[in-house]
Amino acid sequence: MSFKDLVSTISTDQDIPAGTVRKVVKALAENIKASVESGEDLKLPGLKIKTQVTPAREATENRKARPELKRTVVKLRQSDENEAD
Protein backbone atom coordinates (compact mmCIF):
# COMPACT_ATOMS: atom_id res chain seq x y z
CA MET A 1 0.00 0.00 0.00
CA SER A 2 1.39 3.39 -0.92
CA PHE A 3 1.36 6.47 1.31
CA LYS A 4 -1.29 8.01 -0.93
CA ASP A 5 -3.47 4.88 -0.69
CA LEU A 6 -3.13 4.79 3.09
CA VAL A 7 -4.11 8.46 3.43
CA SER A 8 -7.05 8.01 1.08
CA THR A 9 -8.32 4.90 2.87
CA ILE A 10 -8.13 6.48 6.33
CA SER A 11 -9.65 9.73 5.08
CA THR A 12 -12.58 7.90 3.52
CA ASP A 13 -13.13 5.36 6.30
CA GLN A 14 -12.94 7.90 9.14
CA ASP A 15 -14.45 10.90 7.31
CA ILE A 16 -11.38 13.06 8.07
CA PRO A 17 -9.95 15.55 5.55
CA ALA A 18 -7.06 14.03 3.56
CA GLY A 19 -4.74 16.93 4.47
CA THR A 20 -5.21 16.24 8.18
CA VAL A 21 -4.69 12.51 7.72
CA ARG A 22 -1.56 13.18 5.63
CA LYS A 23 -0.02 15.26 8.44
CA VAL A 24 -0.84 12.66 11.11
CA VAL A 25 0.40 9.69 9.07
CA LYS A 26 3.62 11.52 8.19
CA ALA A 27 4.21 12.39 11.87
CA LEU A 28 3.49 8.78 12.86
CA ALA A 29 5.98 7.46 10.28
CA GLU A 30 8.66 9.92 11.48
CA ASN A 31 8.14 8.85 15.09
CA ILE A 32 8.30 5.15 14.21
CA LYS A 33 11.53 5.80 12.30
CA ALA A 34 13.03 7.69 15.26
CA SER A 35 12.04 4.87 17.61
CA VAL A 36 13.69 2.26 15.36
CA GLU A 37 16.85 4.36 14.95
CA SER A 38 17.17 4.84 18.71
CA GLY A 39 16.60 1.14 19.40
CA GLU A 40 13.50 1.85 21.48
CA ASP A 41 10.74 -0.77 21.38
CA LEU A 42 7.39 0.50 20.15
CA LYS A 43 4.02 -1.03 20.99
CA LEU A 44 1.02 -0.06 18.91
CA PRO A 45 -2.41 -1.64 18.82
CA GLY A 46 -1.87 -4.91 16.99
CA LEU A 47 1.87 -4.35 16.37
CA LYS A 48 5.11 -4.55 18.28
CA ILE A 49 8.24 -3.08 16.70
CA LYS A 50 11.53 -4.12 18.25
CA THR A 51 15.06 -3.21 17.17
CA GLN A 52 17.85 -5.63 17.94
CA VAL A 53 21.42 -4.32 17.81
CA THR A 54 24.39 -6.61 17.22
CA PRO A 55 27.58 -4.78 18.24
CA ALA A 56 30.42 -4.24 15.79
CA ARG A 57 33.20 -6.80 15.83
CA GLU A 58 36.88 -6.29 15.11
CA ALA A 59 38.73 -8.64 12.78
CA THR A 60 40.67 -11.56 14.24
CA GLU A 61 42.76 -14.26 12.63
CA ASN A 62 39.67 -16.40 12.10
CA ARG A 63 36.90 -13.82 11.52
CA LYS A 64 36.30 -10.76 9.38
CA ALA A 65 35.44 -7.41 10.93
CA ARG A 66 31.74 -6.60 11.03
CA PRO A 67 30.03 -3.23 11.52
CA GLU A 68 27.21 -2.76 14.01
CA LEU A 69 24.02 -4.36 12.71
CA LYS A 70 20.48 -3.19 13.44
CA ARG A 71 17.61 -5.53 12.78
CA THR A 72 14.03 -4.42 13.17
CA VAL A 73 11.35 -7.01 13.82
CA VAL A 74 7.67 -6.23 13.44
CA LYS A 75 5.35 -8.64 15.22
CA LEU A 76 1.61 -8.84 14.85
CA ARG A 77 -0.02 -9.22 18.23
CA GLN A 78 -3.45 -9.70 19.69
CA SER A 79 -5.00 -6.48 20.89
CA ASP A 80 -5.46 -6.43 24.65
CA GLU A 81 -8.86 -5.05 25.57
CA ASN A 82 -7.36 -3.58 28.77
CA GLU A 83 -4.58 -1.82 26.85
CA ALA A 84 -4.81 1.97 26.66
CA ASP A 85 -5.19 3.39 23.15
Image: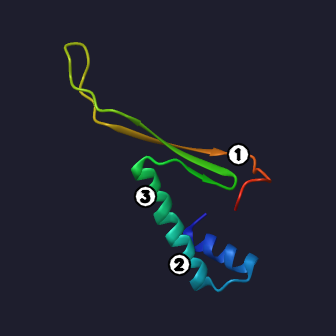
**Mark 3: which amino acid?**
Ala
Crowd class of label 1 (few under 14; some 14 to 19; many from 20; radius 10 Å) = few
- Per the image, label 1 sits on a secondary structure element best described as loop
Residue 77 has which mark?
1
Q: Residue at x 48, y 63 (%)?
A: 31
Residue 69, compared with residue 18, is above or below; it is above
Q: Residue at x 70, y 45 (%)?
A: 77
- From the image, tell me which residue sits under label 3: 34
Q: Quadrant of the C terminus?
A: bottom right
Mark 2 / mark 3, whichever is N-terminal? 2
Q: Quadrant of the N terminus?
A: bottom right
Q: How is the image coloured?
A: rainbow
**What x and y, as percent, mark residue 11?**
68, 79
Q: Quadrant of residue 73?
A: top right
Q: Is residue 4 left or right of residue 15?
A: left
Crowd class of label 2 (few under 14; some 14 to 19; many from 20; radius 10 Å) = few
**Mark 1: which amino acid?**
Arg
State the CA–CA distance, disc 1 to disc 3: 22 Å
- Per the image, label 3 sits on a secondary structure element best described as helix
Q: Residue at x 36, y 37 (%)?
A: 69
State the CA–CA distance, disc 2 to disc 1: 26 Å
